[in-house]
């Protein structure tokens, strides 16, 4: 299961999306950065402060949690974001004794400052119902300044899909069996829906199986309803991988808000091949050399391309939007290696026009780059170095809608810390 989650939609006219590390880090030296900060006090943790530090792409954005009443060794690992949107983040902490502690941090709303609230029931409910914490989404209820939390579970044997809904107004859980009309092909190869990530679409939470499609659930209604949106077929060179390996290495899905409503986008990365053969290029061929059974034709990877699709929520089709070949990037690809010698994967859609990739050279010992590509202009928007395990780094990144700071000022690209060259820079 991928440990990164996509946030919800961004509002019209607001800044674009950013990349947010889901792992919390010590960042006391960066406290001077203008940011979103929320505080609370609990019996178990004492006083707590959560700070979200946002940087425009390409640098990473990140968050940290401060518990001054506790010793550093009180926790077994860094805090982890499970869900984010432009309105809130859901995260958990790992005390050395006891179960993980869950919290929700909400950005300011009209008449309210940023808030930080514990969720004491969440861990026990997820554990008792065998629900993955990575399949939880949050939708704000702006009419009452409350929120709704939704957790998804599928029974692989009975093929029953269940949504567990927690409403902060009343602090009660409800359980809903989802009546879904799914196409028959959903149950071939690996039967059922297996969400890789969770997204938001207005008042709906979407559970995304990156191979098959999105299950949207309207959780603000007392009677939860669900609908299924299939994703495009895999690109030709990815067909053989369908439903047999992790799709997050080649696919991503996001939702954004437009003047006419919401738009769903899908990006897919495809390796490109040429054929090489052992048949000699000769002007004279001796009879003794003729043996077609010994001639070998082998595919050779010569690059990759990104293809994006989009659809409005009322459509029953996908429309191809952009195609970017690595050769289109030309001199903008300023990596030390030739593009064809660099392994790139884990595409993350950031808003309407940017895709971030993790790139590593073939002989890399772990060092790599996060490359932000402008898919509309077919240019590299920026490159930052990373010194981290390939999968762990992009398991720790999510696409997140940028927010204006209290008082209406947005963080400019030049403020805050220097470019993050490794995760260790944040310690």
Image: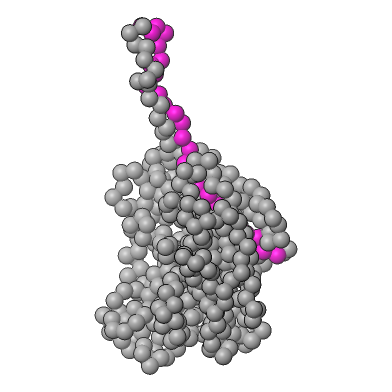
Q: Quadrant of the N terminus?
A: bottom left
Q: Where is residue 379 in the image (x, y as percent from the top left)?
A: 54, 47
Q: Which residue lies furthest to the bottom in this view?
A: 43
Q: Where is residue 61 in the image (x, y as percent from the top left)?
A: 46, 67
Left or right of 14: which side holds 52? left
Q: Residue at x 53, y 69 (%)?
A: 161
Residue 410 seen in this snapshot: no
In the image, is residue 312 above or below residue 165?
A: above
Front-lying residue, 302 or 247: 247
Front-lying residue, 175 or 332: 175
Q: Residue at x 71, y 61 (%)?
A: 314
Question: Residue 23 appears in which quarter of the rendering?
Answer: bottom left
In the image, is residue 123 above or below residue 281?
A: below
Residue 88 is covered by the magenta coloring: no
Q: Main secondary structure of the magenta part?
A: strand
Q: Residue at x 43, y 62 (%)?
A: 2
Span highlighted in magenta in the image: 261-286
Q: Which residue lies furthest to the left in this view?
A: 73
Give the colour scheme shown: one colour
Question: Residue 16 appears in which quarter of the rendering?
Answer: bottom right
Q: Where is residue 78 in the image (x, y as percent from the top left)?
A: 34, 73
Front-lying residue, 426 or 8: 8
Q: Position of residue 119 (x, y in %)?
A: 46, 85
Question: Residue 43 appears in which quarter of the rendering?
Answer: bottom left
């Amino acid at each position: 299961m991928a440990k990164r989650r996509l946030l919800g939609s961004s509002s019209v006219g607001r800044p674009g999306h950013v990349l947010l590390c889901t792992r919390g880090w010590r960042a006391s030296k960066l406290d001077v950065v203008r940011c979103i900060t929320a505080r609370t006090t609990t019996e178990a943790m004492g006083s707590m402060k959560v700070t979200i530090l946002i940087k425009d792409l390409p640098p990473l954005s990140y968050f940290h949690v401060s518990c001054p009443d506790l010793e550093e060794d009180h926790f077994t690992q860094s805090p982890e974001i499970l869900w984010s949107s432009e309105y809130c983040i859901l995260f958990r902490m790992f005390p050395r004794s006891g179960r993980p502690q869950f919290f929700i941090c909400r950005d300011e709303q009209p008449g309210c400052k940023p808030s930080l609230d514990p969720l004491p029931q969440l861990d026990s409910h997820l554990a008792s119902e065998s629900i993955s914490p990575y399949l939880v989404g949050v939708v704000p209820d702006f009419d009452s300044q409350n929120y709704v939390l939704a957790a998804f579970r599928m029974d692989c044997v009975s093929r029953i899909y269940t949504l567990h809904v927690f409403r902060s107004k009343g602090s009660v859980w409800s359980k809903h069996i989802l009546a879904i009309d799914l196409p028959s092909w959903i149950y071939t190869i690996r039967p059922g829906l297996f969400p890789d990530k969770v997204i938001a679409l207005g008042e709906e939470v979407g559970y995304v199986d990156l191979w098959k499609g999105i299950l949207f659930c309207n959780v603000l209604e007392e009677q939860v309803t669900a609908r299924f949106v299939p994703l495009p077929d895999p690109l030709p060179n990815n067909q053989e991988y369908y439903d047999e390996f992790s799709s997050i290495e080649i696919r991503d899905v996001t939702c954004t808000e437009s003047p006419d409503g919401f738009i769903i986008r899908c990006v897919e990365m495809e390796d490109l091949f040429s054929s090489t053969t052992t048949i000699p290029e000769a002007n004279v061929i001796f009879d003794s050399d003729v043996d077609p059974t010994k001639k070998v034709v082998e595919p050779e990877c010569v690059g990759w391309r990104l293809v994006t699709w989009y659809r409005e929520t009322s459509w029953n089709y996908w429309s191809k939007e952009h195609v970017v070949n690595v050769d289109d990037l030309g001199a903008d690809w300023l990596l030390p290696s030739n593009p064809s010698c660099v392994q790139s994967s884990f595409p993350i859609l950031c808003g309407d026009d940017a895709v971030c990739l993790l790139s590593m050279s073939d002989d890399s010992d772990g060092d790599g780059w996060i490359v932000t590509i402008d898919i509309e202009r077919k240019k590299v928007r920026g490159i930052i170095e990373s010194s981290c395990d390939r999968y762990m780094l992009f398991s720790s990144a999510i696409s997140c809608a940028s927010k204006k700071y209290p008082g209406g000022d947005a963080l400019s690209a030049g403020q805050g810390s220097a470019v993050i060259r490794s995760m260790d820079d944040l310690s």
